[in-house]
C-alpha cells in the first residue's frame, strides 16, 4: 500500500483552541485459590490547547476489581471513559482497527497511538519530522517520526491539517524518555501507573498474607481506596 509522506515543520502550528483528553489504562494481577484477581485502572488527563500552548485542566481515575484476567476489563473501562468525557480531541494508547472488531465504540475525533508494532516494515529514509497518511475503510492510518522513534497512529479525525498539527506539536515536549511519542498520552501513562503501583502494594500484601479469598481481597482494596 502506497503512503503519502508529509514533511512536518514549525509551520505546522496549532492555531486552534481545543480541549484535549488523553486516556490510558493499567492493571495488576495476583493469583489466588479462586483464580486470578485483577485490579484495573483507567485514567484521563485533560488539557486545553490554545495557539500551540498546552495547559493542564484536571485528571480522572476509574477503577475496577475483577475475579478474572483484567485485560478485557481494562479495554472496556478505557472506552467507557473515552465515550463519556467531553473533549474536542481524544488520544488513546489503542489500535482502533482491532478494538472495533472486538465491539468497542471508537469516540468521535479520536487518535490512537500504537507503540508496539513491527518497525522493520516501515521503510522510510526521510529525516524527521514526518508523517504518512493512508485511508483504510473509515480510518486514516500511518506512521510518524518526530525525533528518534517511529510510532503508528489510527484516527477517525477527518481534518488532516489538524491531525498533522496535533501530532507535531504534542510530540515535542523536552522529556527524553518520551522519545517523540505524545506528551498527553505520556502523562496519562504515568498517572495510571502511579495509582496502579499504590494499589499493587495492597495486592502484594494480600498475596503474601495468603488472604486468598476474593471477598477478602476486595474488602482490603476498597478500604485502601478511601485513603489513596
Image (cartoon, helix red, strand yellow):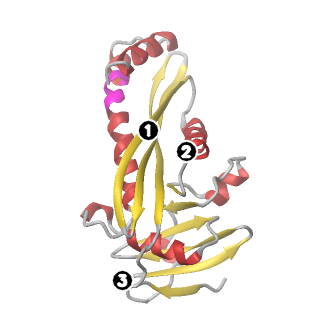
Residue 185: which quarter of the image?
bottom left
Label count reads 3
**Label 2 crowd bin: few (<14), some (14–19), many (20+), radius 10 Å:** some
| Circle 1 crowding by C-alpha within 10 Å: few under 14, some 14–19, many from 20 | some
> Where residue 46 appears, x then y in whole percent?
42, 49
Q: Where is mark 2, residue-wise? A: 85
- Measuring from the top left, give residue 64's x and y in whole percent: 52, 28
Label 2 vs 1, first from the N-terminus? 1
User: In this image, 163 relative to 147: left or right?
Assistant: right
Instruction: Say above or below: 99 vs 156.
Output: above
Reading the image, the residue beneath label 1 is 60
The residue at which mark 3 appears reads as 10
**Of the image marks 3 and 1, the number of the one nearer the N terminus:** 3
Residue 200 located within the stretch drawn in magenta: yes
Q: Are marks 2 and 1 in contact (CB under 8 Å)?
A: yes
Task: Report helix, strand or loop for mark 3.
Answer: loop
Could you tell whether 2 is left or right of 78 in the image?
right
Query: Residue 128: where, in percent of width, then height?
Result: 38, 83
- Please tell me which residue lies in front, 82 or 64: 82
Q: Residue at x 58, y 76 (%)?
A: 160
User: Gap between marks 3 and 1, in whole Å?
Assistant: 32 Å
Relative to 15, residue 37 above or below = above
Q: CA distance from mark 3 to mark 2?
A: 31 Å
Q: Earlier in the sequence, mark 3 or mark 2?
A: 3
Q: Secondary structure at mark 1?
A: strand
Magenta highlight range: 198-203
Of 121 and 91, which appears nearest the observer?
Answer: 91
Q: Reply above or below: 67 against 84.
A: above
Amino acid at each position: 500500500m502506497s503512503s503519502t509522506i508529509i514533511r512536518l515543520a514549525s509551520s505546522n502550528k496549532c492555531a486552534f483552541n481545543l480541549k484535549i483528553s488523553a486516556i490510558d489504562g493499567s492493571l495488576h494481577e495476583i493469583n489466588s485459590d479462586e483464580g486470578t484477581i485483577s485490579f484495573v485502572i483507567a485514567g484521563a488527563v485533560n488539557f486545553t490547547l490554545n495557539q500551540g500552548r498546552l495547559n493542564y485542566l484536571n485528571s480522572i481515575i476509574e477503577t475496577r476489581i475483577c475475579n478474572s484476567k483484567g485485560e478485557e476489563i481494562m479495554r472496556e473501562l478505557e472506552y467507557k471513559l473515552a465515550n463519556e468525557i467531553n473533549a474536542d480531541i481524544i488520544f488513546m494508547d489503542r489500535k482502533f482497527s482491532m478494538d472495533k472488531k472486538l465491539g468497542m465504540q471508537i469516540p468521535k475525533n479520536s487518535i490512537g497511538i500504537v507503540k508496539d508494532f513491527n518497525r522493520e516494515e516501515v521503510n522510510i529514509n526521510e529525516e524527521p519530522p514526518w508523517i504518512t497518511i493512508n485511508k483504510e475503510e473509515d480510518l486514516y492510518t500511518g506512521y510518524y517520526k518526530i525525533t528518534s522513534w517511529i510510532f503508528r497512529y489510527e484516527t477517525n479525525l477527518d481534518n488532516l491539517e489538524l491531525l498533522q498539527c496535533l501530532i507535531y506539536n504534542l510530540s515535542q515536549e523536552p522529556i527524553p524518555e518520551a522519545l517523540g511519542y505524545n506528551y498527553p498520552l505520556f502523562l496519562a501513562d504515568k498517572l495510571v501507573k502511579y495509582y496502579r503501583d499504590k494499589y499493587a502494594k495492597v495486592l502484594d500484601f494480600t498475596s503474601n498474607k495468603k488472604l486468598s479469598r476474593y471477598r477478602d481481597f476486595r474488602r482490603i482494596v476498597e478500604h485502601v481506596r478511601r485513603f489513596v
